[in-house]
Image (tube, rainbow, N blue to C red):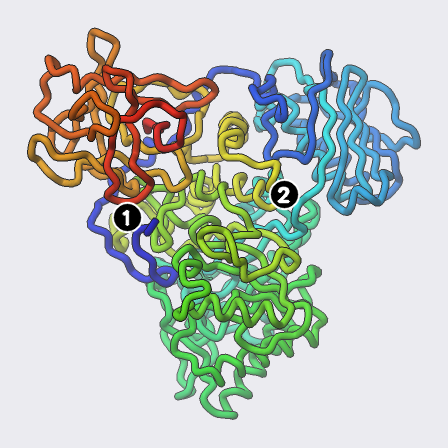
Amino acid sequence: MHRFHRRGRGLVVLASVALTLPLTAALSPAAAASPADPTAPATSTSAPYALVPQPVSQRAVPGAGFTLTPRTRIAVLSKDAAAQGVGSYLAKLLAPATGYDLKVVRKTQAPDKALVLDPGGPASLGAEGYTIASGRNGVVVTAHGAQGLFRGVQTLRQLLPAAVESRTEQSRTWTVAPAEISDAPRYEYRGVMLDVARRFFPVEQVKRYIDEAAAYKINKLHLHLTDDQGWRIAVDALPDLTEVGASTQSGFTGGTDWYYTAADYKEIVSYAASRFMTVVPEIDGPGHTMSALASVPELNCDDRARAPYSGFDVGISLYCLKDSQHQDATKNFLQTVVDAVARLTPGPYLHLGGDETPQATRGEYDAYVKAAADATTAKKKTVMGWHQLGQSPLPAGSLLQYWGEDSDRETIGTASEKPGITHLRQGVAQGAKYVMSPSDHAYLDMKYDASTPYGLSWSGYVPVQRSYAWDPETVTGKLDGTGAVVPAGQIAGVEAALWADRAYEGSSELPTPGTRWPSPQDYADYMSFPRLPALAEVGWTPQSGRDWTGFRQRLAQHGQRWTAAGIGFHPAPGVPWPGTVRTVEGEHVIVTGDVDGVALENAGSTSDGTDLVLWAPNRGPKQTWTVSPQSDGTYTMTNKSSGKCAEASGGAVGATVVQRTCDTGRTGQHWKFTARPNDDRYTIAAVGGLVLTAGSATNGAKATLEPDTGSALQTWTVD
Ligand code: ACM
């Protein structure tokens, strides 16, 4: 299915729809949610507890769980400092909500009635694998080293009631659900990217985000430190980079401290390390470099510094690589910057960007990649970059990040393969490994739907289901999943990317002086939750252990955790959030239940008798229906655009559904909504019992009446 418009990242796209959603409408309904125990057994026997990411295996154990008391000990079966550190971390994690100051003790054998952390498990668990055995007599988390313990502790906290995430003391019992869990990640690289260049995130907000992401077993923090709109890392030898280059953000000028000092950056790195998360710094180039061009004159062909940039465009800058003098200047600059950043970065990677450089010739691009890669390998760091980097010669062991989308995949194997696919092939042939960040699944700045106040939609809308329902092994293949360009053995993992070039309300238009800008933290919370946990599960859980229907049920339980933790999440459509009143009465968009779900709409006609059709959801008036209860238990559906009612055109199989002037005396306008078991979707039946069916998930398909087969084209989300 064709999806919306596609452009390069951040190109100004002025949509005609004015967004008016007040932020208050986005506040969590879970605040008023029932006190349901999120660890209560769910319906599926394979997933007794609402754990995200879903562990490789889990089993509910009969009997009571282990109830914490103020005297419970956290026993670490090792003197290893890192393992002891995980014990202290767990004590601190539990302290605010429980009010308990649990002692961490060093033991050689697992005591009873304790939270036991044993880093002496078999090597077969791998660096991040763990097991949990929890029952009446205590809880034992076993791993092969401290990192696996830390991942296991993230699961352990999900076996406690949601209130454990509260930052204030809650008076209640704290019982760890009884379970046997065995787990290890699908991929080693599970990242999240923050675009601190377009919108500067103060250190405290970065640390908070690290904690939010670590709870879902994310282990890489990619900081997009430089772009046209700002240079965010101090380099001693080049003070203008931060004095001039950090004075702007997208939409802001005049800053004096919108960057990380060496001490700030070290603080972020060490906080991340305490959460077993590796920082991946990105110095983007040769495009996305206006902040550098504004700070270092000799990077420009005329040796004159550019003006600092605070706008919203993309593709506006390039290091001067036209002659050997300027190539040398760029090389020296990159060496200085890479030396400084590498010195501050204990992790193995240095991300060199390489995206969106339409003005660069092949030779210029190659010159940048060689200079940046040489500087990186000289510091014994691994080159990372966006997938375009694959077109140039790369050092062995490089890691590339795929950010293409369905429109690229559509061209695979045709005579007109998109350049992105060619670059992917070139990188694969060089043996590079890949981190998957397909923009139409993994870009957290894409709007959930047309009503999302922030972000962009050049890669389509990314509702929660789209962020979840994809497979890294097929996402570089054709749309039918075959012909993956990146073979499974060259996939390192998955990264969610939170760009921030449109981090304001009403972002489909350029901002005005009256525009409301959320804090970076509020923007990050809203765009990342619930999609970051969805992407975390894509990176962690084996494909065979994942399905959208089960995931949305598990995810729904996490809303209460985020509310308790103060995370301003978006209770996005498609997830059955507890506490959300289940009623079909009111104004709704009515969408089929598959990943590329299509919405019932009236095709823009105001005449009686026109067939209703299906179209990609945009939440516009043509797709908005007022569902009104009738005395016989059925409902009428009135279209907002035409004011007409949905009506069965006949009683035979295959009859179309039309719109007609509302008249409750016409039985064809009476629709019976039936909630499906264990689901928050509906079948919608005409009076004779045939059900409303989308002819296909293609724009323009007709709505007809068919026997109920339970197909996704007959199950409707009433949002
Ligand atoms: C990108 O979105 N330009 C990597």
* Left or right of residue 335, residue 620 in this image: left
Picture coordinates of residue 246, whole percent (x, y): 46, 65
At 58% from the left and 57% from the top, the residue drawn is 435
Picture mark count: 2
At 82% from the left and 43% from the top, the residue drawn is 124
Residue kind at label 2, given as amino acid type:
Trp
* Image quadrant where residue 641 sits: top left
Q: Which residue is at the front of the view, 706 or 365?
A: 706
Question: Badge 2: how crowded within 10 Å, few (<14), some, or many (20+)?
Answer: many
* Left or right of residue 41, residue 81 in this image: right
Element type where label 1 sits in the image: loop
Q: Which residue is at the front of the view, 688 or 328?
A: 688
Report the residue marked by disc 1.
515
Picture coordinates of residue 320, whole percent (x, y): 45, 83
Q: Is residue 42 visible?
A: yes
At 72% from the left and 14% from the top, the residue drawn is 62
Element type where label 2 sits in the image: helix
Picture coordinates of residue 192, whole percent (x, y): 55, 50
Picture coordinates of residue 181, whole percent (x, y): 72, 29
Report the residue marked by disc 2.
540
> Marks 2 and 1: which is nearer the front?
2
**Can you tell me which quadrant of the image ligand 1 is in?**
bottom left
